[in-house]
Image: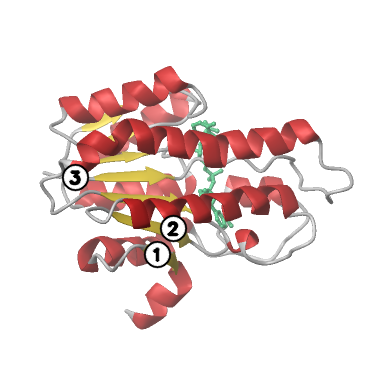
């Protein structure tokens, strides 16, 4: 069975994606910082068929990233890496004139540096994937492409992640590298970003078919957005 590492998999989009892959029999290595929540998720998903390894830790920690890759290797290799864990930089979000630089550093370290670090550590296994070349999904945001007030620090980190994804796709023609904007979702991250926004947002499981479509059809490396993938499917 194929093997995936999904960061930030205890809740929200990461959990929804993990559930869908577990349902397809994938073996999973899941990460998040809060052990109890991650363990609950792993226990639930283990009932779906594939093997599930919960590895609590912070993606900013190089040793933790190495452990994620080692656990995938122990499951037989790595076919998909999903860099999904993310930091906002300020909760709630604030305008750039107030953004603590430490928050910006945290967003860049989590959303960009850690994502590339995990890619670097995972590349040997991804290149050797038996599934016709491994795939990387870097979870992006429209905040990386549009100028929304207060989303500047987080958006800058997602723009950087998009560019890393694009260059990685050019440098690794044997892999698929997809930066994916999932669109707004009603998750803890969104509520922390904009606590006063009472408008209902789609739940994460509703965008998962867009991600599955990428895995099924394996389009060329590039930037995709879930709403377009869902409309076209
Ligand atoms: N929600 C939206 O509207 C929206 C829109 C566009 C893009 N996105 C993107 O979608 C992705 C998923 O977000 P979500 O809305 O599903 O968020 P979420 O529900 O808050 O889940 C975030 C997950 O990441 C984990 N995490 C956070 N920081 C981590 C770290 N340093 N190391 C390891 N795990 C970490 C969290 O667990 P712990 O806190 O226990 O570590 C949790 O499992 C993110 O990349 C986000 O930028 C979301």
Cα distance, mark 2 to mark 3?
Answer: 26 Å
Cα distance, mark 2 to mark 1?
Answer: 6 Å
Q: Earlier in the sequence, mark 3 or mark 1?
A: 3
Please tell me which residue lies in front, 228 or 209. Answer: 228
Q: What residue is shown at x 40% (from left), y 80% (from top)?
A: 231
Secondary structure beneath label 3: loop
Cα distance, mark 3 to mark 1?
Answer: 24 Å
Secondary structure beneath label 1: strand
In this rendering, the answer to whether 140 lies above or below 130 is: below
Q: Are marks 2 and 1 in contact (CB under 8 Å)?
A: yes
Left or right, 36 with respect to 125, comes to right
What residue does disc 2 label? 166
> Which numbered circle lies on residue 26?
3
Q: What residue is shown at x 11% (from left), y 44% (from top)?
A: 1
Please tell me which residue lies in front, 208 or 86. Answer: 86
Q: How many marks?
A: 3
In this rendering, the answer to whether 10 lies above or below 189 is: above
């Amino acid at each position: 069975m194929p093997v995936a590492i999904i960061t930030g998999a205890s809740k929200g989009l990461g959990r929804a994606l993990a559930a869908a892959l577990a349902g397809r029999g994938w073996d999973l290595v899941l990460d998040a910082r809060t052990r109890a929540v991650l363990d609950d998720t792993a226990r639930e998903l283990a009932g779906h068929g594939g093997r599930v390894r919960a590895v609590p830790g912070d993606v900013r920690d190089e040793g933790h990233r190495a452990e994620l890759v080692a656990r995938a290797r122990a499951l037989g290799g790595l076919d998909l890496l999903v860099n999904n864990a993310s930091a906002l930089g300020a909760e709630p979000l604030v305008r750039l004139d107030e953004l603590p630089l430490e928050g910006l550093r945290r967003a860049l370290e989590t959303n960009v540096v850690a994502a590339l670090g995990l890619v670097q550590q995972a590349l040997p296994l991804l290149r050797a994937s038996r599934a016709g070349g491994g795939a990387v999904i870097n979870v992006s945001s429209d905040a990386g492409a549009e100028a929304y007030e207060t989303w500047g620090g987080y958006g800058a980190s997602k723009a950087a992640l998009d560019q890393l994804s694009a260059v990685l796709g050019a440098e690794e023609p044997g892999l698929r590298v997809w930066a994916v904007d999932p669109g707004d979702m009603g998750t803890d991250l969104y509520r922390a970003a904009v606590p006063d926004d009472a408008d209902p947002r789609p739940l994460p499981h509703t965008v998962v078919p867009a991600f599955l479509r990428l895995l099924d059809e394996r389009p060329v490396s590039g930037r995709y957005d879930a709403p377009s993938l869902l409309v076209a499917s």
